[in-house]
Amino acid sequence: MIVVTGATGNVGRPLTQALAEAGEQVTAVSRHAAVVPDGVRHVVADLAAPQGLIPALDGASALFLLLSGDLHAPEARPTDIVDLAVASGVRRVVLLSSQGVATRPLGPSRIAMRAVEDALRGSGLDWAVLRPGGFASNAFAWAESVRTQGTVAAPFGDVGVPIVDPVDIAEVAAACLLDDRHTGGVFELTGPAVITPRQQAEAIAAALGSPVRFHELTRAEAKAAMTRFVPPELVDDTLDIIGSPNPAELRISSDVERVLGRAPSPFGDWVTRSIAAFR
């Protein structure tokens, strides 16, 4: 049985679906009640309090670990989840980490995630680490303004990074959970090309078949907006990356293709699948 944390999110949902379709027994874990695919067990747990994960891990052989905001909660002890996995008899963990662990290792969120990576490496479990860059699904933050005003507002309009489709992340995670060949791998996951916020707005407009205006925010404006839904310790980290990516953050990785045998999906594919959110 495979446990998927963050199972209702942009990565966890397609991962849960893919594993269920592959005939695996799956337990989907989320913070709130949710609809999951037929045949999938659902457990409500908050990873900021790791002991709540114990019922989900009962009988599990593998765990997909997505910490998200739970990494930064005041009471969080994310490395305890690795200990719980060992104690519960889990044999394999696939961790959704961050590209920034390697490219900006001194950021507060990167230090915390590195500690989880290190705990996993020292656990005696089979493991794989996924380090994606920016997510295509971050564009959902623009959905309301596109629907109501025909506008995308973002900072650094002409600075791009190779954002990755969450479905590509999910498919790589499934491969790492199911295939021993990927054990011990650290996979940097990017899209196939650098794309700027202005170009993302153009892709949304093309999929809608109607104009979308791009409005460039100042860094201060962007920070004020982001602090409403991003943990404060992540805001400056994120703005630093998207405003001034370093060479490692601009590099197109071959790891999606190496694992999946196909090129990573372009942003336009994600927009096409997700366009209902922008109408």
Image: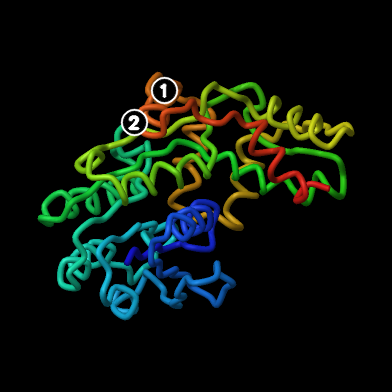
- Residue at horizontal 23 percent and vertical 56 percent from the top: 92
User: The disc labelled 2 sits on which kind of residue?
Assistant: Thr
Residue matched to label 2: 103
Residue 171, given in percent of the width and then of the height, sits at 45, 44
Above-or-below relation of 279 to 244: below
In this rendering, position of residue 235 left or right of residue 155:
left
Residue drawn at the location 61% of the way across and 36% of the way down: 219
At mark 1, the secondary structure is loop
Q: Position of residue 13 (x, y in %)?
A: 53, 58
Along the viewing direction, whichever of 135 and 222 lies nearer the viewer: 135
Q: In the figure, 113 relative to 45: above or below?
A: above
User: In the rendered image, which quarter is residue 24 located in?
Assistant: bottom left
**Pointer 1 local density, CA inside 10 Å: few below 14, some 14–19, many at least 20:** some
Image quadrant where residue 56 sits: bottom left
Number of the label disc, if any, that sits on residue 171: none
Nearer to me, 248 or 122: 122
The span from disc 2 to disc 1 (Cα, nearest Å) is 8 Å
Q: Mark 1 is on which residue type? A: Asn
The reply to whether the C-beta atoms of the residues labelled 2 and 1 are less than 8 Å apart is yes
Tag 2's secondary structure?
helix
Compared across the picture, whether 117 is left or right of 259 comes to: left
> Which residue occupies 31% across, 45% down?
176
Please give the residue where the numbered disc 1 appears in the rendered image. Answer: 246
Residue at point 38% right, 59% down? 67
Dot 2 alpha-carbon crowd within 10 angstroms: few under 14, some 14 to 19, many 20 or more: some
Q: Is residue 253 left or right of residue 36?
A: left
Numbered circles on residues, count:
2
Taking depth in this image into account, of 102 and 61 the one nearest to the observer is 61
Q: Position of residue 274 (x, y in %)?
A: 70, 46
Q: Quadrant of residue 35?
A: bottom right
Compared with 251, 59 (above or below) is below
Question: What is the x, y in percent for residue 125?
Answer: 15, 55
